[in-house]
Amino acid sequence: MTYVVIGLGKFGFHVAKGLAQQGEMVIAIDHDEEKVRNISEYVQDAIMLDSSDPRALREAGIAEAEVAIVSIGEHLESSILTVMALKEIGIETVVAKAITPVHGQILSKLGAAKVIYPEMESAKKLVKKIVANMHYETIDLSITMKIAKMTVPQFWIGTSILSPTFEEEYEVKPIAYKHQGEWHTSFEKNDILEKGDILVVLGNSNNVEALSKKV
C-alpha cells in the first residue's frame, strides 16, 4: 500500500516518518523545499509541488496511491482545495487534519473518509494524564520499594485502616492517611476510610504498580 502525506509540519513529518518506519511506502509532499529535504531520507519519495493542483498530483503519480493524509490544518483554503484535488484524481481514502469542528465538517462533505483533530486529541490526553496523577502519585524509595499517595478508591471506602485486606489482597501497607484536613500516622481499629480521604501506602514496586491499575 502506498501512502501520500501532504503537509510536512510537525504532525505530517512524524506521520510520514512513522509510516515509513513501519515498512510502508510513503510519498511526502509539501510546497516548502526545506521540509521536503528534511523528510527525504526517511521516505520512498519526497516531492515539492502545489497539492491543490490536480494536474500536478497526477503528473507526480499520486493517483496511484491508496491512502492520502492531508496535514495542512493551519491553512484552511489549501487544506480544502487539496482534499478536493485528491478526490478529483480518484484517491479513495483521504484522511484530513482539521483544527476546528467547522473545518472538519467541510472536509467530510468534500469526501474525507476520516477527519482528525491532533491538537484536541493531544489536549484530551494531557488533561486525562494530569487528572490521573492528581489521584495517584508514586515515589521511588529504592529499585524495589515505592510509596503511593492516592485519593481513597471506592473499593476501600468504609474499610478500617487496620484491615488485613491491604496486605492480604494488595500486598501494600498503609503508613498515613488524611481525614478532614488532618494527617494521621498512628491508627486505631475504628479509623474508617471515608470518601475524599487521602491514603499513603508502602509496598513492593510491582505491587504498587499493580494497584495503580485498579484505582
Image (cartoon, helix red, strand yellow):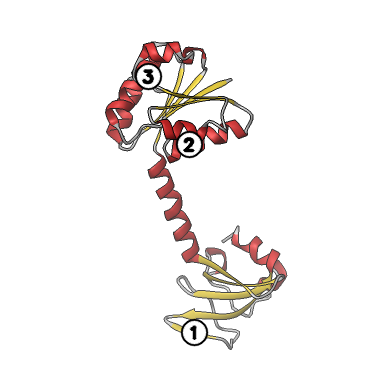
Q: In this picture, is 58 found above or below 103?
A: above
Q: In this picture, is 66 found above or below 205?
A: above
Percent across and percent down for residue 195 are 47, 70
Between disc 2 and disc 1, whose residue precedes?
Answer: 2
| Distance between the alpha carbons at the discs numbered 2 and 1 | 50 Å
Residue to which mark 2 is pinned: 13
Between disc 1 and disc 3, whose residue precedes?
Answer: 3
Q: Which mark is residue 111?
A: 3
> Which of pointers 3 and 2 indicates the residue nearer the eye?
2
Which residue type does callout 2 highlight?
Answer: Phe
Q: Which residue sits at x=43%, y=11%?
A: 58
| Distance between the alpha carbons at the discs numbered 1 and 3 | 59 Å
- What kind of element bears circle 2? helix
Q: Is residue 184 left or right of residue 21?
A: left
Mark 3 packing: few (<14 Cα in 10 Å), some, or many (20+)?
some
Percent across and percent down for residue 162 are 63, 80
Which residue type does callout 3 highlight?
Answer: Gly
> Which of pointers 1 and 3 indicates the residue nearer the eye?
3
Percent across and percent down for residue 90 are 43, 11
The quarter of the picture where residue 106 lies is top left
Q: In this picture, is 45 found above or below 143?
A: above
Q: Which residue sits at x=66%, y=61%?
A: 210
Q: Is residue 208 left or right of residue 120?
A: right
| Distance between the alpha carbons at the discs numbered 3 and 2 | 23 Å
- What kind of element bears circle 3? loop
Q: Which residue sits at x=39%, y=31%?
A: 32
Q: Which mark is residue 183?
A: 1
